């Protein structure tokens, strides 16, 4: 595991349960590494395009923000 990966924390989407590894470097910057296929909401938003082209899943963003508020994910 490299240094960048070590700075990521496991987070689950409160809506679909998809697991990701996330890191926050500031209030505005979030890194997300998917642990498996994209969630159905993100895949739907992609409309057949690669899901990497979709900026974010709003439910996952809310879950990551909640993890920060609850102290499970630190802004470094």
Image (spheres, rainbow, N blue to C red):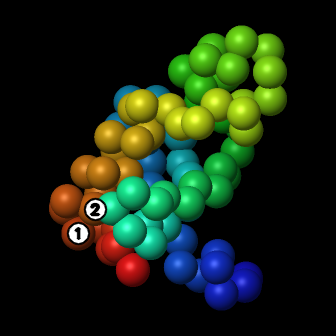
| Residue furthest to the left | 70
Please tell me whether residue 5 is drawn above or below residue 21 in the rendered image: below
Q: Are marks 2 and 1 in contact (CB under 8 Å)?
A: yes
User: In percent of the image, x 80 and y 29: which residue is there?
Assistant: 50
Q: Quadrant of residue 74?
A: bottom left
User: In percent of the image, x 63 and y 14: which residue is there?
Assistant: 44
**Disc 2 to disc 1, C-alpha distance:** 5 Å
Q: Quadrant of residue 71?
A: bottom left
Answer with left or right where residue 28 lies relative to residue 56.
left
Mark 1 — residue?
71
Check the picture and name the quadrant holding the C terminus. Answer: bottom left
Judging from the image, what secondary structure is the residue with disc 2 in? Answer: helix
User: In percent of the image, x 64 and y 56: which residue is there?
Assistant: 33
Image x and y of residue 12, in percent: 44, 48
Please tell me whether residue 66 is drawn above or below residue 2 in the rendered image: above
Check the picture and name the quadrant holding the N terminus. Answer: bottom right
Q: Nearer the viewer, residue 44 or 28?
A: 28
| Other residues around mark 1 within 10 Å, as few (<14) / some (14–19) / many (≥20) | few
């Amino acid at each position: 595991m490299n240094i960048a990966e070590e700075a990521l924390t496991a987070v689950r989407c409160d809506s679909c349960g998809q697991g990701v590894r996330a890191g926050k470097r500031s209030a505005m910057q979030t890194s997300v590494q998917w642990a498996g296929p994209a969630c159905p909401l993100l895949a739907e938003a992609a409309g057949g395009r690669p899901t990497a082209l979709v900026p974010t899943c709003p439910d996952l963003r809310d879950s990551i923000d909640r993890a920060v508020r609850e102290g499970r994910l630190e802004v470094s």
